[in-house]
Image (tube, rainbow, N blue to C red):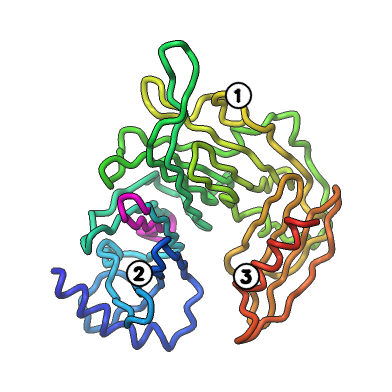
């Protein structure tokens, strides 16, 4: 099976490289290894049941990249939205993606890769009639653990944090999953899934009027904007019912088990910083396509979207939204470099 996967990936790569691949995530590890996950299209003669597959490339320095399939992406259906996280201590790569089994339902699949071997993917939040898009994955390595004297102290614990946009025929919202990892694999019994709106006070989220041409896409891309190597994670997400944006801090704790405490702001020792809520930019009407990146620095925000020849962005600074602006991009000034410049600008304003 392993030989088949490697051979099939090599045969497939030529086709995938020619096509414009929009569904891609790239991660660089502390030792300089570059992991890239892309979509690919299996040939009609491959015998693969999937409409498309996910392909992982691994590059160390100037060596030629190594290509392989994410094994469960050969399952029948459509695979997309893949995102990566890496634990340097165990040298484990995690891949999270959406598997759409049919036109009305999807599930989240999480696989891990370590020491040249794949661990089987685990299904997360598999419910009929839910469509999950715009995945983001973060990682923390410590948790606040309850002590005998009633206080909390940080202890080692590897946690993945996933956010995504979830739609059914009657609702649409940003959701969050806490995914504890033990011995390199997911502890399924400890998985927690929440609506992110549960962490926002109801009275802080009034309806906000927007222009008739307002594009709500800017609200459908929840983001993990801070995932430090400690015990909390910061998340920014939108609410399309009230045209709002929120920033919250989630703080997992360990008492009987690892979990997110109930209540506003994810609870946790010390309470954390209070949630931030603000109205969406009312006149935003740009036809952004693909992933939207989010930068948060205290009470300052930036949303950015890469086009063919520019990085387009809008900022929230000093209590006001800017107009949509652009940074021209080319082979010398890539969208990634432009995004780094935007991050620096927001950080120093």
Q: Earlier in the sequence, mark 2 or mark 1?
A: 2
Q: Position of residue 160 (x, y in %)?
A: 42, 45
**Label 3: which residue?**
289
- Give the residue drawn at x 27%, y 73%: 68
Which of the two discs, 2 and 1, sits closer to the camera? 1
**Label 2: which residue?**
54
Q: Are marks 3 and 2 in contact (CB under 8 Å)?
A: no
Do we see residue 62 in this rendering? yes
Which residue is more in the foreground, 159 or 124? 159
Q: Position of residue 92 (x, y in %)?
A: 31, 55
* Residue at mark 2 to residue at mark 1: CA–CA distance: 42 Å
Q: Is residue 313 left or right of residue 31?
A: right
Q: Is residue 301 left or right of residue 38?
A: right
Q: Position of residue 243 (x, y in %)?
A: 74, 47
Quarter that holds the C terminus = bottom right
Q: Is residue 148 above or below residue 95?
A: above
Which residue is more in the foreground, 340 or 171? 340
Q: Is residue 88 above or below residue 189?
A: below
Which residue is more in the foreground, 153 or 346? 153
Decide whether residue 132 is among the magenta residues.
no
**Label 1: which residue?**
270
The 10 Å Cα crowd at callout 1, few under 14, some 14 to 19, many 20 or more, is few
- The region drawn magenta spans 88-104
Pick out the residue farthest to the front: 31
Decide whether residue 97 is among the magenta residues.
yes
The 10 Å Cα crowd at callout 2, few under 14, some 14 to 19, many 20 or more, is many
Q: Earlier in the sequence, mark 1 or mark 3?
A: 1
Q: Is residue 300 above or below residue 262?
A: below
Badge 1 element: loop
């Amino acid at each position: 099976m392993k030989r088949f996967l490697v051979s099939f990936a090599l045969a497939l790569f030529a086709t995938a490289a020619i096509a414009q691949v929009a569904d891609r995530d790239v991660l660089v590890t502390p030792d300089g290894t570059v992991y890239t996950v892309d979509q690919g299209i299996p040939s009609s003669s491959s015998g693969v049941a999937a409409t498309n597959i996910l392909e992982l490339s691994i590059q160390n320095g100037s060596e030629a990249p190594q290509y392989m399939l994410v094994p469960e992406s050969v399952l029948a259906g459509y695979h997309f939205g893949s995102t990566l996280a890496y634990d340097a201590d165990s040298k484990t790569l995690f891949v999270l993606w959406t598997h759409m089994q049919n036109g009305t339902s999807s599930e989240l699949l999480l696989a891990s890769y370590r020491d040249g071997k794949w661990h089987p993917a685990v299904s997360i939040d598999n419910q009929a009639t839910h469509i999950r898009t715009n995945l983001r994955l973060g990682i923390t390595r410590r948790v606040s653990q309850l002590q005998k004297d009633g206080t909390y102290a940080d202890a080692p614990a590897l946690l993945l944090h996933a956010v995504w946009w979830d739609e059914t025929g009657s609702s649409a919202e940003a959701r969050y999953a806490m995914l504890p990892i033990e011995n390199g694999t997911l502890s399924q019994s400890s998985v927690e899934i929440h609506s992110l709106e549960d962490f926002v006070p109801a009275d802080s989220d009034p309806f906000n009027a927007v222009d008739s041409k307002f594009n709500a896409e800017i609200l459908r891309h929840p983001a993990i904007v801070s995932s430090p190597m400690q015990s909390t994670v910061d998340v920014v997400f939108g609410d399309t019912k009230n045209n709002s944006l929120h920033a919250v801090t989630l703080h997992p704790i360990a008492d009987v088990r690892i979990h997110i405490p109930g209540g506003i702001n994810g609870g946790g020792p010390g309470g954390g910083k209070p949630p931030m809520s603000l109205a969406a930019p009312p006149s935003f009407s740009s036809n952004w396509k693909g992933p939207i990146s989010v930068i948060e620095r205290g009470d300052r925000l930036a949303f950015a979207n890469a086009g063919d020849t520019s990085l387009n962005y809008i900022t929230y600074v000093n209590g006001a939204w800017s107009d949509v602006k652009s940074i021209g991009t080319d082979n010398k000034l890539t969208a990634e470099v432009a995004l780094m410049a935007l991050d620096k600008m927001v950080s120093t304003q």
